[in-house]
Image (cartoon, grey):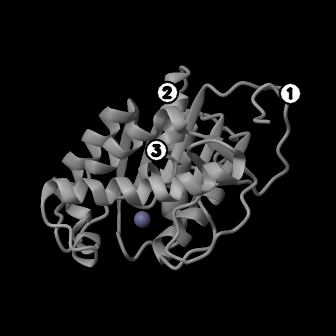
C-alpha cells in the first residue's frame, strides 16, 4: 500500500484553467511540501485582449504566486483534439515528472478544448506505462487521476470530494488577478471599469463559487473534485466532521 502525495501534475487546456478550478488546492499542496507542476496544453491564445507574450507573462506571474513549476505546450488553442501525437507529448511529460496524482479537466464541458484535454490526460496517463513507444523517460503509470471543475456548462454535479481551501482563498484570488487580459468580457457584463471594480469582480466571482462548495462541507471555502475510480484512504485523519 502506498500513500502520501509528493508530486502533483495539473493539466489544463489553457493557462488559468488550473488556477480557476483548483488554485486553492495547489496552494494547500505546495504549502504542505508537495511539488506541483502545471502543464498547459495550449498557450490559450488568440483571445480578444491577449497575445502569446501577455498570456505568458500572466501565467508565469500566477505560477510564481502559487509557487509551482509551469510548462506550456504549443498545441492549437480552440482547435484542440484528442490526437495521438498530443497524447504522446503529455505522456512524455508524465514519464519525466512522475506525479503521484494527475488533475485533469472534468469530462463534460461545453468547451471542446476542455473535453479534449480531459480525454488527452486520461489517455496520456495510460500511454505513460507503454513499452516499445518513442517517449522519453521510463515506463510510468500515475497511481491516481482526479477531475477538477472548470466547465462552461451551467451544471452543479455532485463532487466525489471537496478540499477545504479556506487558508488559501486569498492566494487563489491573487493568482487569478494575474490574468488581466481575460477579464474584459466579464468586466463588460458587470460594468466593472476601474481596476478596483475589476478586482472586486474577480474576488466576488471566485468567493461565490468556492463559498458554495465550502458550504457543502461546512468550511468557508472549498474546491470540488471528481474521481473516475474508487478512492482509498489509509486513515480518516483529514476528514472534516
Ligand atoms: Zn479553458
Crowding at mark 3 (Cα within 10 Å: few <14, some 14-19, many 20+): many
Q: Looking at the image, do the residues carrying marks 1 and 2 touch, with CB atoms under 8 Å apart? A: no
Image position, residue 1 (x, y; %): 87, 26
Judge whether residue 137 can be spotted in this image: no
Query: Residue placed at 56% from the left, 49% from the top?
Result: 91
Query: Residue placed at 80% from the left, 36% from the top?
Result: 241
| 201 relative to 103 in the view: left or right | left
Image position, residue 133 (x, y; %): 61, 50
Query: Residue placed at 61% from the left, 75% from the top?
Result: 155
Question: What kind of element bears circle 1?
Answer: loop
Mark 1 vs mark 2, CA separation in Å: 21 Å
Image position of 24 with respect to 227: above or below: above
Question: What kind of element bears circle 3?
Answer: helix
Judge whether residue 28 can be spotted in this image: yes
| 123 relative to 27 in the view: left or right | right
Mark 3 vs mark 1, CA separation in Å: 26 Å
Nearer-the-camera pick, 35 or 189: 189
| 166 relative to 80 in the view: left or right | right
> Circle 1 is placed at which residue position?
234
Outermost residue to the top: 33
Q: Earlier in the sequence, mark 3 or mark 2?
A: 3
Image position, residue 41 (x, y; %): 42, 57
- Image quadrant of ligand 1 equals bottom left
Query: Residue placed at 12% from the left, 60% from the top?
Result: 194
Q: Earlier in the sequence, mark 1 or mark 2?
A: 2
Mark 3 vs mark 2, CA separation in Å: 11 Å
Residue 118's quadrant in the figure? bottom right
> Circle 3 is placed at which residue position?
23
Image position of 126 with respect to 76: above or below: above
Circle number at residue 30: 2
Amino acid at each position: 500500500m502506498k500513500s502520501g502525495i509528493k508530486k502533483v501534475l495539473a493539466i489544463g487546456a489553457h493557462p488559468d484553467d488550473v488556477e480557476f478550478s483548483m488554485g486553492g488546492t495547489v496552494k494547500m499542496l505546495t504549502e504542505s511540501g508537495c511539488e506541483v507542476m502545471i502543464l498547459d496544453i495550449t498557450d490559450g491564445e488568440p483571445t480578444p485582449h491577449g497575445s502569446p507574450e501577455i498570456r505568458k507573462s500572466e501565467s508565469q506571474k500566477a505560477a510564481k504566486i502559487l509557487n509551482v513549476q509551469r510548462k506550456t505546450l504549443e498545441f492549437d488553442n480552440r482547435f484542440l483534439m484528442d490526437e495521438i501525437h498530443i497524447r504522446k507529448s503529455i505522456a512524455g511529460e508524465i514519464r519525466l515528472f512522475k506525479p503521484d496524482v494527475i488533475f485533469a479537466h472534468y469530462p463534460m464541458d461545453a468547451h471542446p478544448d476542455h473535453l479534449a484535454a480531459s480525454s488527452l490526460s486520461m489517455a496520456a496517463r495510460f500511454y505513460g506505462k507503454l513499452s516499445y513507444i518513442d517517449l522519453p523517460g521510463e515506463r510510468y503509470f500515475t497511481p491516481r487521476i482526479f477531475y477538477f471543475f472548470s466547465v462552461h456548462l451551467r451544471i452543479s454535479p455532485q463532487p466525489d470530494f471537496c478540499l477545504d481551501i479556506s487558508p488559501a482563498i486569498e492566494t487563489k484570488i491573487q493568482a487569478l488577478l494575474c490574468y488581466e487580459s481575460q477579464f474584459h468580457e466579464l468586466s463588460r457584463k458587470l460594468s466593472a471599469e476601474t481596476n478596483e471594480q475589476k478586482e472586486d469582480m474577480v474576488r466576488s466571482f471566485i468567493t461565490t463559487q468556492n463559498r458554495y462548495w465550502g458550504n457543502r462541507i461546512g468550511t468557508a471555502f472549498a474546491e470540488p473534485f471528481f474521481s473516475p475510480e474508487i478512492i482509498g484512504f489509509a486513515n480518516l485523519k483529514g476528514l472534516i466532521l
